[in-house]
Image (cartoon, helix red, strand yellow):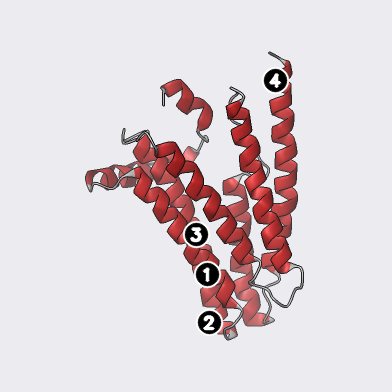
Amino acid sequence: MTPSAQSVSRRTLATRDARWARTLAACLAAWGVRPNSVSIAGSAFACVSATAFYISAGFSPGARAAILLVAAACIQLRLLCNLLDGMLAVECGLKTPVGEIFNELPDRVADVMILAGAGYAAPDIPVSATLGWTAAVAALFTAYVRVLGGALGQKQQFIGPMAKQHRMFVLTVGTIVAAFQTLTSGTQRMVPVALAVILAGSALTSVRRVHRIAVQARAR
């Protein structure tokens, strides 16, 4: 991938310039860790998060709260992997010919696992599972629209309001609140609420991205 191609297909993240991120990426590179392995690790954390969501409802309130906090932590660890794989590939010069495959496909799998799994964390709310799966589809669609712009030769659109980091932030906060809800009311109602916000925000995000793609296409 040429530098110009990298500039149009990479999300702008302020955390890449943080000293801790650069130090961690440099340490991983020195230890022989490669970006594709980090991408796979991100999917592994997503799987743990999804599993935690799925099984959480079957435990006592105290254990349920702890499991939900594990789910939230693994969401953030998944995002950390998403940050570091790109830094290893670009900043540390370790990109591979198949790097883009490892960058995109595990990410889409992770989105589906986390969002769909979260839908099963509140079985007392009948629409919760449906919200999880629908939010997962909506997340996939936002990514599809982004890549569509790139396929048309345009700069890929990473705008929100519900890009990947935004929806994972919403779900993380909702999950942490739900963990405390289990201790006070025995329910995890904030998880489906977070999923509903993600679904609505993803729909708006797709509309905004399609609009920008259309504007750029007409300007040619």
Marks 2 and 1, the one that precedes in the sequence: 1
Mark 3 to mark 4: distance in Å? 36 Å
Give the crowd class for mark 2: few <14, some 14-19, many >=20 residues within 10 Å: some
Could you tell me how far apart the alpha carbons at marks 1 and 3 are, in whole angstroms? Answer: 9 Å
> Mark 2 = which residue?
63
Residue indicated by mark 1? 51
Q: Tell which tag, 4 or 2, sits nearer the viewer.
A: 4
* Mark with earlier residue (4, 2): 2
Question: Disc 4 and disc 1: Cα gap in Å?
Answer: 42 Å
Q: Is residue 22 left or right of residue 62?
A: left
Residue on which the image places disc 4: 217
Q: Residues within 10 Å of mark 3 (few under 14, many from 20)?
A: many
The image position of residue 165, as x and y in percent, is 57, 47
Disc ID at residue 46: 3
Q: Which mark is residue 26?
A: none
> Quarter of the image containing the N terminus?
top left
Query: In the image as oriented, which residue stretches furthest toward the bottom?
Result: 60
Q: Amino acid at mark 1?
A: Thr
Is there a contact, CB below 8 Å, between mark 1 and mark 3? no
User: For the residues marked 4 and 2, what is the alpha-carbon distance in whole angstroms?
Assistant: 53 Å
Instruction: Give the residue displayed 27% in from the left and 46% down from the top.
Output: 27
Depth check, front residue: 196 or 119: 119
| Mark 1 or mark 3: whose residue is earlier in sequence | 3
Quadrant of the rendered structure where residue 161 is? top right
Q: Amino acid at mark 4?
A: Ala
Query: Alpha-carbon neighbours of circle 1 within 10 Å: few (<14), some, or many (≥20)?
Result: some
Instruction: Give the residue type that dot 2 points to.
Output: Ala
Q: Is residue 77 visible?
A: no
- Residue at point 59% right, 67% down? 176
Q: Earlier in the sequence, mark 3 or mark 2?
A: 3
